[in-house]
Image (tube, rainbow, N blue to C red):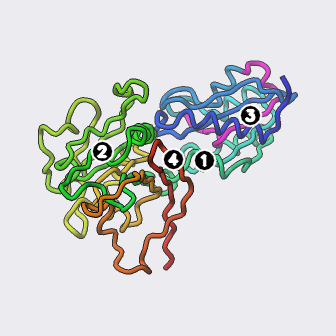
């Protein structure tokens, strides 16, 4: 096998890390590629699930004795603590690798320090290779751990004129089956799905993840969260079924905001304490507006159907915007056609001042 460069190995490690999206929380996604002393790939691994072996351990097991004198290329700084598994830094030292290349340092005080341990053992450590790509691949976990509350993705579906339903309230289906299946793939990458009680009362959704092949329930289901300040969620609502865990978050339990509703920052802090690192905000338009007005949305994913209604509920209301100067500006990062619909991904720009 031909040797590969460290840059190529890191690109492969980032690809491997992505395989853990949706299954590793509250841990990060991590990928690792091990090169022997001649630069040949002798081991690969990724962190597949919380409590399971870390990426470095999987790659070291594949490499065996060929790891000695080689290079470990890893997307996140190897952990330096004992949790459900032992320190990856110690495992790399024991394997006698000569060099460790890290894309992004670990921001958590409990796990950081792996680079220092490796250097103390005489191992060369290089930081920052393909750091931006590795950050993007692990953005939810990194963001959540740096600030103490989950990464929030607002997902909505609308017609080209911004309507989420017809004037008579009917909304099934705004977008195509292909777009709806894409939403299930998106749900599968997060730890929790959030809706307001108004959406529950109007649509009675299940908010589960279904397999794309046969429509059956996926093995792993995100936590379903209903923002319900006064506890109005019906006892027979589908969201209360046994298909997934559900939390009815009331103002009495979480705390009330200035408007008397559920305090949204407190809600996110509580979810973080439950191990939630990424959430999908799915409805409704008023709750989405409250999240946006509070500056709590990190990414917007809009599914636009090639339809016009001319009337009916808007996809977003009450976002704290009263004049064009207060508009929430977005940076579009991706536009993809999903069946007949468009999926637009954008990041809110930080407001100055």
The foreground one among 256 and 152 is 152
Q: For residue 72, which numbered disc appears in the image?
A: 3
- The residue to which callout 2 is attached is 173
- Label located before the other in sequence (2 or 3): 3
- Label located before the other in sequence (2 or 1): 1
Q: Quadrant of residue 179?
A: top left
Question: Dot 2, crowdedness within 10 Å: few (<14), some or many (≥20)?
Answer: few
Please say if 30 is above or below 298. above
Question: Dot 1, crowdedness within 10 Å: few (<14), some or many (≥20)?
Answer: many
Q: Going 72% across and 39% down the picture, which residue do you hit?
A: 10
- Give the CA separation, mark 1 to mark 4: 35 Å
- Label located before the other in sequence (4 or 3): 3
Q: For residue 337, which numbered disc appears in the image?
A: 4
- The residue to which callout 1 is attached is 106
Q: Residues in magenta?
A: 63-82
The foreground one among 286 and 140 is 286
Q: Secondary structure at mark 1?
A: loop
């Amino acid at each position: 096998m031909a040797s590969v460069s460290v840059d190529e190995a890191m690109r492969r490690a980032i690809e491997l890390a992505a395989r853990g999206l949706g299954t590793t929380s509250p841990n990060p996604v991590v990928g690792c590629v091990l090169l022997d002393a001649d630069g040949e790939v002798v081991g690969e691994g990724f962190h597949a699930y919380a409590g399971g072996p870390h990426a470095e351990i999987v790659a070291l097991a594949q490499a065996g004795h060929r790891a000695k004198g080689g290079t470990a290329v890893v997307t996140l700084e190897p952990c330096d603590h004992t949790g459900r598994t032992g320190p990856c830094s110690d495992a790399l030292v024991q394997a006698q690798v000569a060099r460790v290349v890290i894309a992004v340092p670990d921001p958590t005080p409990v796990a950081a320090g792996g680079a220092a341990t490796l250097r103390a053992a005489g191992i060369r450590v290089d930081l920052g290779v393909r750091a931006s790509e590795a950050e993007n691949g692990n953005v939810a976990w990194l963001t959540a751990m740096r600030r103490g509350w989950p990464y929030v993705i607002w997902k909505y579906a609308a017609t080209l004129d911004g309507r989420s339903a017809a004037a008579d309230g009917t909304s099934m289906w705004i977008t195509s089956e292909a777009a709806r299946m894409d939403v299930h793939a998106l749900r599968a990458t997060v730890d929790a799905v959030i809706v307001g009680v108004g959406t529950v009362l109007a649509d009675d959704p299940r908010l589960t993840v279904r397999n794309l092949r046969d429509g059956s329930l996926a093995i792993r289901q995100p936590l379903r969260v209903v923002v319900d300040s006064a506890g109005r969620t019906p006892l027979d609502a589908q969201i209360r079924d046994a298909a997934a865990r559900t939390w009815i978050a009331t103002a009495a339990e979480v705390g009330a905001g200035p408007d008397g509703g559920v305090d949204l920052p407190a809600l996110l802090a509580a979810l973080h304490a439950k191990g939630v690192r990424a959430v999908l905000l799915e409805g409704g338009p008023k709750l989405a507006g409250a999240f946006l007005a509070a500056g709590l949305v990190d990414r917007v994913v809009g599914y636009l159907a090639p339809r016009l209604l001319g009337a009916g509920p808007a996809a977003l209301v009450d976002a704290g915007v009263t004049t064009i100067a207060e508009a929430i500006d977005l940076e579009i990062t991706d536009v993809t056609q999903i069946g007949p619909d468009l999926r637009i991904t954008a990041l809110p720009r930080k407001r100055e001042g």
